[in-house]
């Protein structure tokens, strides 16, 4: 019994409604789980996450769009992620705490979307919790905390809900948000739209809503930041592949460097692909499992299309690039494991539980907190970079320092002007000119349009100090200070500071 007060102050009692518990236990449980996971994994946030956090902190405290306070930049790949983090940073006064809060919010949002989609498709209630568990403990997705991966998955899931509920305006708004999270996520959204039955119904309203949500930011960025599309498009495509390793075969590279983490990351997607083939065979008979899985099969197809589209780009295989395809595949696997009724269905759920348990046992096997993210390409641990950044600030103060190759954690913890193409638009101008010279006629035209309002008179910041990296055990004799660095990816190196000549 629950006591309540009437308008005249009298006490009445009412029976507890089971529906309240049924509706609230999932978001509460997901919020608690996500907060614990972020607290455990926070020491291993990768360097690129701290680039985003530096943007958020500068916006929240200084109203400045840039990685450092000394220069306006447009190297934040996910404008919406940065803006949400900035808002939360203004509230919590700490960008790392803001990242944790945003992760909790996006996880709860994702869980609610999956529960709604699962109920619409007739899946049992265990579908959403299983999907969330598989996503939350996935080693690769854990290695992308603070990036835009979880935010993208949440909005994509709601786009699926709006497809199922035939809400063209809400779907368009979701697609607009996807473009602001990462422009390439529109590939997944387009598949959801085009594969739906009678896709042309409400298509005009969907397109208009997408434009209405996304266009204001891109126009603002075009005029005020000098480019509609973030500069990371130029930076990443200019980097090319890592030798023979591009996005398409990147998982094989990570399989060599991080075998167990890579297997645990991609195994659910491989099982999801296998389940997709079984679903195709069942589709001929059009049984009940076929209809229950159809919406999630579209999501699996969208993830596959995104993977193929990214493989066609000449970009490095950064591990968080795989986040959208992994998320789509894992959600489909959870749906497939829960789609079968009776004892066999519980066996499927048990298989999902074993995958979750295997990831948890592996992650915690060597104690907590971990020194490194399960999959990473940084040169040293985040904790080590933080210590170096604080020492760096005590040496250089507010004077600019040229980056030695990785900038995120150092710039954040030093709170000084560590400069490279991500932070300094003057340096970025040189990268833009290089890419423009190599582009085709159409590529040149598109770049000219994108950079119409770019201030080409900006000069690079002239740093008084420079960071360098030595692959030997000793720093040069001219070094003011040096620090040993190393990671499972980069092995042993020495980071050192010198005066810039």
Image (spheres, rainbow, N blue to C red):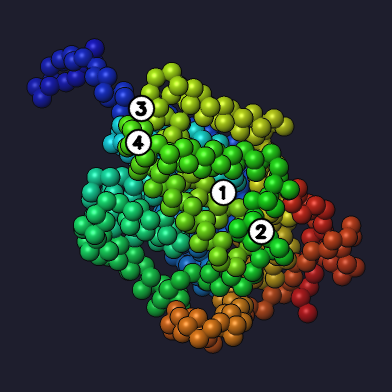
The residues tagged by marks 2 and 4 sit, at their Cα atoms, a distance apart of: 58 Å
Residue 31 visible in the shown view: no
Q: Position of residue 303 (x, y in %)?
A: 47, 51
CA gap, disc 1 and disc 4: 40 Å
Element at label 2: helix
Residue 214: give x, y in percent of width and height: 34, 64
Q: Would you name the residue on which mark 2 appears?
A: 410
Quadrant location of the C terminus? bottom right
Q: Earlier in the sequence, mark 2 or mark 1?
A: 1
- Residue denoted by label 1: 144
Q: Which residue is mark 3?
A: 124
Using residue 339 as the reference point, say whether residue 454 is left or right of it: right
Q: Is residue 383 left or right of residue 290?
A: right
Specify which label sits upstream in the sequence, 3 or 1: 3
Q: Residue at x 60, y 58 (%)?
A: 248
Point 30% across, 28% down: residue: 23
CA distance for labels 2 and 1: 18 Å
> How many neighbours does mark 4 have within 10 angstroms: few (below 14), some (14-19), or many (20 or more)?
few
Residue ID for mark 4: 285
Q: Which tag, 1 or 4, sits closer to the chain's start?
A: 1
Inter-mark Cα distance, 3 to 1: 30 Å
3D distance between C-alphas at marks 3 and 2: 47 Å
């Amino acid at each position: 019994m629950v006591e309540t007060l009437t308008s005249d102050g009298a006490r009445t009692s009412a029976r507890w409604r089971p529906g309240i518990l049924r509706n609230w236990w999932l978001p509460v449980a997901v919020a608690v789980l996500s907060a614990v996971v972020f607290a455990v994994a926070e020491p291993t946030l990768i360097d690129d996450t701290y680039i985003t956090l530096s943007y958020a902190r500068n916006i929240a405290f200084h109203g400045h769009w840039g990685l450092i306070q000394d220069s306006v930049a447009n190297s934040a790949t996910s404008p919406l992620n940065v803006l949400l983090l900035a808002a939360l940073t203004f509230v919590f006064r700490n960008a790392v705490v803001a990242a944790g809060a945003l992760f909790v919010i996006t996880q709860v949002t994702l869980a609610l979307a999956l529960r709604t989609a699962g109920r619409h498709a007739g899946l049992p209630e265990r579908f959403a919790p299983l999907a969330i568990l598989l996503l939350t403990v996935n080693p690769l997705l854990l290695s992308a905390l603070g990036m835009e991966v979880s935010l993208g998955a949440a909005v994509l899931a709601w786009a699926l809900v709006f497809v199922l509920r035939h809400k063209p305006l809400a779907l368009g708004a979701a697609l607009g948000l996807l473009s602001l999270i990462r422009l390439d996520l529109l590939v997944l959204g387009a598949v959801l739209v085009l594969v739906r039955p009678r896709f042309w119904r409400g298509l005009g309203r969907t397109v208009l809503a997408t434009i209405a949500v996304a266009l204001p930011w891109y126009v603002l960025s075009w005029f005020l930041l000098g480019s509609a599309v973030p500069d990371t498009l130029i930076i990443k495509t200019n980097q090319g592949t890592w030798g023979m390793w591009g996005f398409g075969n990147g998982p094989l590279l990570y399989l060599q460097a991080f075998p167990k983490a890579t297997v645990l990351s991609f195994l659910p997607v491989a099982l999801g692909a296998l389940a997709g083939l079984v679903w195709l065979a069942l589709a001929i008979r059009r049984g009940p499992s076929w209809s229950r899985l159809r919406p999630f099969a579209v999501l699996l197809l969208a993830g596959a299309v995104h993977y193929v589209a990214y493989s066609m780009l000449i970009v490095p295989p950064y591990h968080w690039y795989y986040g959208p395809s992994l998320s789509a595949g894992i959600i489909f696997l959870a749906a497939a494991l829960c789609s079968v009724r009776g004892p066999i269905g519980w066996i499927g759920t048990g298989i999902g539980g074993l995958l979750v348990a295997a990831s948890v046992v592996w992650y915690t096997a060597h104690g907590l907190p971990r020194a490194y993210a399960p999959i990473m390409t940084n040169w040293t641990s985040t904790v080590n970079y933080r210590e170096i950044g604080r020492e760096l600030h005590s040496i250089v103060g507010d004077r600019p320092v040229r980056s030695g190759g990785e900038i995120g954690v150092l710039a954040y913890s030093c709170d000084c002007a560590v400069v490279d193409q991500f932070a300094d638009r003057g340096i970025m101008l040189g990268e833009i000119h290089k890419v423009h010279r190599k582009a085709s006629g159409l590529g040149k035209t598109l770049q000219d349009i994108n950079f119409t309002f770019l201030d080409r008179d900006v000069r690079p910041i002239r740093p008084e100090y420079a960071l360098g990296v030595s692959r030997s055990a000793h720093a040069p004799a001219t070094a003011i200070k040096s620090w040993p660095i190393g990671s499972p990816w980069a092995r042993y190196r020495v980071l050192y500071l010198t005066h810039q000549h």
